[in-house]
């Protein structure tokens, strides 16, 4: 598969009016490699990408028209080993009932249950491109063989996996931006030094009392800083505040 600036730009979306054109370009790229694309802008969302008029791309562009197809299954985000793997991998991979295949070993993938793979994944094999977006959102595009008997994808993956990665990331990231998906965090949220310090200790499990002793401040002061941080990050509780602060790069959740 030949990459070029023009081919990458063909799947890039600047406004909602570009969505249909970009989807058709991605569809053509996939079918030229003997695959059919299945895009998801957010694996946690029951909705799938649509064009400016609200038409479902999976059905109207990518040709997923059967009664039992992935985008009609509201539980696929929970049931499918493909979406599960996207939470633990950021690079393209391919998978069938026999296991996951990546360029670099990933022990998290080997722990994923592949029982009844075809039923749960709604495909016999696929090349999958996880698309990790700002604020913790995860999109994905899976490329499924047009030939249903094709279950070994080593050759296709080696030839096209990297290119699929570029096309899929360009399409999904620009789709999310152009379609105005609500940000998980306010754009102007900026934490203070004290707020960050409190959250760093909270992230490793310290209580308000323990943090107050470490910082030499009152427990009320610690609660004040963590509450302010939660308000800035539009978080509903302490755990979500810590998570969102980590997504913005203020703290690390690595142990």
Image: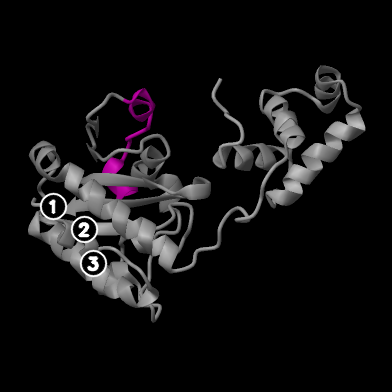
Q: Choose the circle earlier in sequence order: 3 or 2.
A: 2
Q: Are marks 3 and 1 in contact (CB under 8 Å)?
A: no
Q: Give the residues drawn in magenta, as a range.
A: 106-122
Instruction: Look at 37% across and 33% down and name the residue there.
Output: 113
Q: Is residue 145 above or below residue 102?
A: below
Residue at disc 2, secondary structure: helix
Q: Which residue is mark 2?
A: 8
Mark 3 packing: few (<14 Cα in 10 Å), some, or many (20+)? Answer: many
Q: Is residue 152 part of the magenta span, yes or no?
A: no
Q: CA distance from mark 1 to mark 2?
A: 7 Å
Residue at disc 1, secondary structure: loop
Q: Which mark is nearer the camera, 3 or 1?
A: 1
Looking at the picture, tell me which residue is in the foreground, 122 or 56.
56
> How many labels sit on residues?
3
Q: Is residue 113 part of the magenta span, yes or no?
A: yes
**Which label number is shown at residue 26?**
none
Instruction: Look at 61% across and 53% down and name the residue there.
Output: 185
Q: Position of residue 111 (x, y in %)?
A: 38, 26
Q: CA distance from mark 3 to mark 1?
A: 21 Å
Q: Which residue is mark 1?
A: 3
Q: CA distance from mark 3 to mark 2?
A: 18 Å
Instruction: Look at 24% across and 54% down and name the residue there.
Output: 167
Q: Choose the circle earlier in sequence order: 3 or 1.
A: 1
Left-right relation of 188 to 212: left
Q: Choose the circle earlier in sequence order: 1 or 2.
A: 1
Q: Are marks 1 and 2 in contact (CB under 8 Å)?
A: yes
Looking at the picture, tell me which residue is in the foreground, 150 or 169.
169
Q: Are marks 3 and 2 in contact (CB under 8 Å)?
A: no
């Amino acid at each position: 598969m030949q990459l070029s600036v023009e081919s990458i730009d063909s799947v890039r979306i600047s406004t909602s009016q570009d969505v249909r054109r970009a989807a058709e370009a991605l569809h053509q790229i996939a079918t030229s490699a003997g695959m059919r694309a299945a895009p998801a802008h957010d694996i946690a969302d029951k909705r799938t990408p649509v064009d400016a008029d609200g038409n479902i791309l999976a059905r109207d562009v990518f040709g997923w028209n059967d009664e039992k197809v992935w985008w009609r299954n509201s539980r696929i985000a929970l049931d499918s080993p493909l979406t599960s793997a996207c939470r633990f991998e950021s690079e393209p991979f391919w998978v069938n009932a026999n296991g996951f295949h990546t360029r670099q070993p990933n022990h998290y993938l080997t722990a994923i249950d592949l029982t009844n793979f075809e039923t749960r994944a709604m495909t016999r094999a696929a090349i999958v491109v996880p698309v990790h977006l700002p604020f913790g959102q995860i999109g994905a595009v899976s490329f499924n063989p047009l030939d249903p008997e094709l279950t070994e994808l080593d050759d296709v993956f080696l030839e096209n996996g990297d290119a699929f990665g570029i096309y899929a990331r360009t399409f999904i990231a620009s789709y999310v931006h152009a379609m105005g998906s609500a940000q998980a965090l306010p754009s102007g949220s900026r934490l203070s030094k004290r707020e960050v310090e409190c959250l760093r200790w909270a992230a490793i499990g310290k209580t308000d009392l323990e943090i107050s002793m470490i910082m030499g401040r009152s427990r009320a002061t610690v609660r004040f800083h963590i509450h302010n941080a939660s308000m800035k990050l539009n978080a509903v509780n302490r755990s979500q505040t810590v998570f969102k602060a980590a997504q913005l790069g203020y703290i690390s959740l690595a142990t």
